[in-house]
Amino acid sequence: MQTILGANGTIGSLLAKELRTYTQSIRLVSRNPKKVNDTDELFPADLLEPGSVEKAVAGSDVVYLVVGLDYNIKVWQEKWPVLMRSTIDACVRNRARLVFFDNVYMYDIKAIPHMTEDSPINPPGRKGIVRKQISQMLMDEVKAGRLEALIARAADFYGPGADKSLVTEMVIRNLSKGKAANWPVDADKKHAFTFVPDAAKATALLGNTSDAYNQVWHMPTDRNALTGREFVSLFAESMKKKNKVMVMPVWLFKILGIFIPILKEMPEMMYQYDRDYIFDSSKFERKFNFKPTSYREGVRQTVA
């Protein structure tokens, strides 16, 4: 049995499709899970309720933690350590392997222009501190020999199904209405994005590769990172819309955050847009002979 915790999220549904390559015993866990494959087992649960993770994980060989909590620092500080602890404990008791889908918030700000699995951990923001805490919890159990686990780390998302991504919210939706695409801080800096279908395929592959465990992996991402303007241009071309970009300074996010709660959470993350942001996935590409989807093809599929 392979179990997905957070099965309704951006990665979860695509991951369920990819896991069919390896098993027909797939359990989907979320508040209101929906079948992706005919043979999926649905397990409705609120994973933040005491004991729920233990029940959801029972009988599993591999567990994928791909939950997306509300993008709110108070929620993250309160709930992520609890969820990680209960997931680790449940996996240890059930002798299940754990795959944790993570982001790059814990990396040192100086690592952003070229991030690898060995980049220094020194988060510059509060959300990064939470990510450092929970990833350390997992790796401490690995080092102690109590748990087999791996961390699958991705850059910012784009692609089919990534409805809550910055690209969807600020680029695609605006262009579709004939408006200028919005871009944070500096549209002339390069910014890598991970294509969601590639990330799902890679996560399934890692979870079913014995010697991939007990280490960190960067999800396959096109190494030819584009500037914000270049990325928007691809979308405008594919959508047959006018290519227009409006750069949003940090102060504007702060003002808009008064009216739009999600934007209030953004200013502390803007260091990722005021410099080149390059995500190196060569470790994964070499190991699995995997070629990431190009940005042009990824944009084409997203728009389609």
Image (spheres, rainbow, N blue to C red):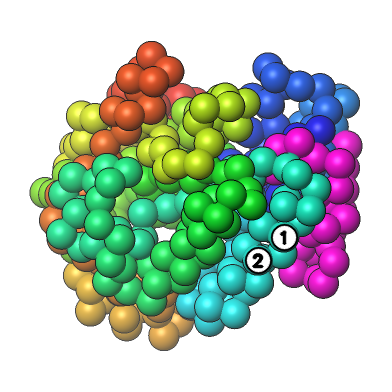
Q: Residue at x 16, y 49 (%)?
A: 113
In this view of the protein, can residue 245 be seen by the observer? Answer: no
Is 60 magenta? The answer is yes
- Near mark 2 (Cα within 10 A), the count class, few <14, some 14-19 or many ≥20, is some
Quadrant of the image occupied by residue 76: bottom right
Q: Please report contact status of discs 2 and 1: CB closer than 8 Å, yes or no.
A: yes
Furthest residue in direction front, as rendered: 144
Q: Which mark is residue 89?
A: 1
**Residue 141: percent from the left, percent from the top?**
57, 56
Vertical comparison of 114 with 87: above or below: above
- The residue range painted magenta reads 41-64
**Residue 26: percent from the left, percent from the top?**
80, 32
Q: Residue at x 23, y 73 (%)?
A: 250
Quadrant of the image occupied by residue 60: top right
Question: How many numbered marks are there?
Answer: 2
Q: Residue at x 76, y 63 (%)?
A: 47
- Near mark 1 (Cα within 10 A), the count class, few <14, some 14-19 or many ≥20, is some
Determine the secondary structure under disc 1.
helix
Mark 2–mark 1 distance (CA, rounded to whole Å) = 6 Å
Left or right, residue 241 beside residue 161: left
Vertical comparison of 43 with 161: above or below: below
Left or right, residue 247 beside residue 161: left
Residue corresponding to mark 2: 85
Q: Amino acid at mark 1?
A: Asp
